[in-house]
């Protein structure tokens, strides 16, 4: 089976909708990341929130990457998948006491702390357990990522992080807390960023904050610049691997790292989006008053991104070589927002055809819900298909 090809005959035997992961695309992507971030001072973590499918996580862990987790269940999943605790970072604005204790029990690499109250709680809980918690302060650099408002995280108006103006004061507070060990700074400005300019601006902010920390006598071993690199949703066949070369080069050349500092990245979407596809079956083709509809058995409960973010996913008819027609592709859920794409050219469809919603590996299966009491979609990988051939 060639990379990017679909085993359509095998798909016919599987109940739809389901997610299909091309493990060859995933491995090619991971190899490219390792090649482009090969510097000894660079450490890449996988943002588990993008996709927690066990087969995907185990593959990423096997390549030696770390994990970026935003709650206790993700920490458990990362450990079960083979990510070592010393490569796990714990982010998130609302860490619970139970989750903090879990992370402390497993001696994770770092807590990415987002507020002074959180810092105080971690200190208290670590003290109760007789431990010292390693901490990176998440600083809000007030950088506009020029992406969708729901996935922009680095502006002053967002809920994430500590304001730049308070960074030194909070860092000094770390030194006063007996069960806190300040090891670095953490940043994250947003997601699905394809223009390198916001990352360049982030470098300027990071350099500025590091200067201020040094002037205050504070030494930092780790700088974490988050993730955010986007993928090409329009052309997944031709651009299946994101622009990792330019992405890593921005930080390689733009940051004034000090001797001995480690640079951390938290990639999610760019690792897994292109390897995943939502496979759905055509239920009906309906002629409306002004347009034609393809009604499929997948809905917004299976892939919510188009409804939530107005996101685009390329749709391909896997079982038709008929001339293209213009359709709205919609799901069965009783919501007008249950639309995958409007006015899109798809090979002429009929009942029973299989459609692939491409680039769905990130924030696809992981965000599925049981709305309308629908069953969660299953998944299968290309490795599974090969085993059964």
Image: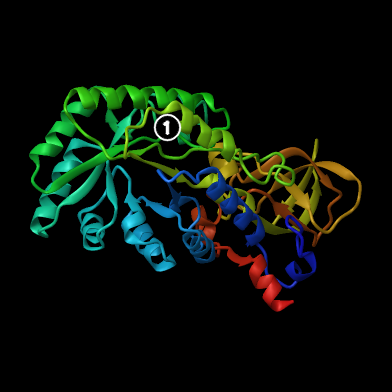
Looking at the picture, tell me which residue is in the foreground, 197 or 98.
Answer: 197
Query: Can residue 300 be seen in the rendering of this structure?
Result: no
- Please, is residue 140 above or below residue 128 in the view? above
Screen quadrant of the C terminus: bottom right
* Residue 7 located left or right of residue 142: right
Q: Residue at x 80, y 38 (%)?
A: 291
- Please, is residue 61 above or below residue 362 in the view? below
Residue 105: % across, % down: 22, 63
Residue 316: % across, % down: 77, 50
Q: Which residue is mark 1?
A: 189
Residue 335: % across, % down: 58, 46
Looking at the picture, tell me which residue is in the foreground, 179 or 122.
Answer: 179
- Please, is residue 252 above or below residue 36 in the view? above
Query: Can residue 355 be seen in the rendering of this structure?
Result: yes
Residue 40: % across, % down: 43, 46
- Across the whole image, how many numbered discs are drawn on residues? 1
Quadrant in the picture for residue 297: bottom right
Query: Residue pushed farthest front?
Result: 259
- Please, is residue 105 above or below residue 230 in the view? below
Label 1 Cα neighbours within 10 Å, binned few <14 / some 14-19 / many ≥20: many
Q: Residue at x 36, y 23 (%)?
A: 205
Looking at the picture, tell me which residue is in the foreground, 129 or 37.
Answer: 37
Screen quadrant of the N terminus: bottom right
Q: Label 1's element?
A: loop
Quadrant in the picture for residue 3: bottom right
* Residue 270 located left or right of residue 81: right
């Amino acid at each position: 089976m060639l990379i990017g090809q679909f085993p359509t005959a095998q798909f016919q035997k599987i109940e739809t909708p389901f997610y299909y992961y091309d493990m060859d695309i995933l491995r090619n992507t991971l190899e490219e990341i390792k090649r482009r971030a090969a510097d000894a001072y660079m450490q890449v973590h996988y943002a588990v929130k993008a996709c927690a499918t066990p087969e995907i996580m185990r593959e990423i862990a096997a390549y030696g990457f770390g994990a970026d987790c935003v709650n206790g269940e993700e920490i458990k999943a990362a450990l079960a998948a083979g990510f070592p605790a010393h490569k796990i970072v714990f982010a998130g604005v609302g860490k619970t006491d139970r989750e903090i204790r879990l992370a402390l029990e497993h001696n994770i690499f770092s807590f990415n702390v987002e507020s002074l109250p959180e810092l105080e709680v971690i200190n208290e809980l670590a003290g109760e357990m007789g431990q010292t918690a390693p901490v990176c302060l998440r600083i809000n650099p007030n950088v506009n990522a020029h992406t969708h408002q729901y996935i922009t995280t680095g502006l002053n108006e967002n809920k994430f992080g500590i304001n730049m103006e308070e960074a030194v004061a909070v860092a000094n507070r770390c030194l006063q807390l007996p069960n806190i060990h300040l090891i670095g700074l953490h940043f994250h400005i947003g997601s699905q960023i394809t223009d390198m300019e916001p990352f360049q601006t982030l470098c300027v902010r990071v350099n500025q904050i590091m200067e201020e920390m040094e002037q205050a006598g504070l030494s930092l071993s780790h700088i974490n610049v988050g993730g955010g690199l986007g993928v090409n949703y329009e052309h997944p066949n031709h651009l299946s691997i994101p622009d990792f070369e330019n992405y890593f080069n921005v930080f390689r050349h733009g940051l004034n790292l000090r001797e001995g500092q480690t640079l951390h990245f938290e990639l999610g979407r760019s690792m897994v989006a292109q390897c995943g596809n939502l496979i759905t079956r055509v239920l009906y083709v309906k002629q409306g008053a002004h347009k034609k509809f393809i009604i499929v058995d997948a809905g917004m409960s299976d892939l919510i991104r188009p409804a939530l973010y107005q996101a685009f996913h390329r749709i391909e008819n896997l079982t038709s070589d008929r001339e293209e027609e213009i359709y709205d592709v919609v799901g069965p859920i009783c919501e007008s927002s249950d639309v995958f794409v409007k006015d899109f050219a798809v090979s002429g469809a009929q009942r029973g055809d299989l459609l692939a919603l491409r680039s769905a590996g990130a924030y696809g299966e992981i965000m599925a819900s049981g709305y309308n009491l629908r069953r969660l979609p299953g998944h299968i990988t290309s490795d599974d298909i090969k085993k059964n051939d």
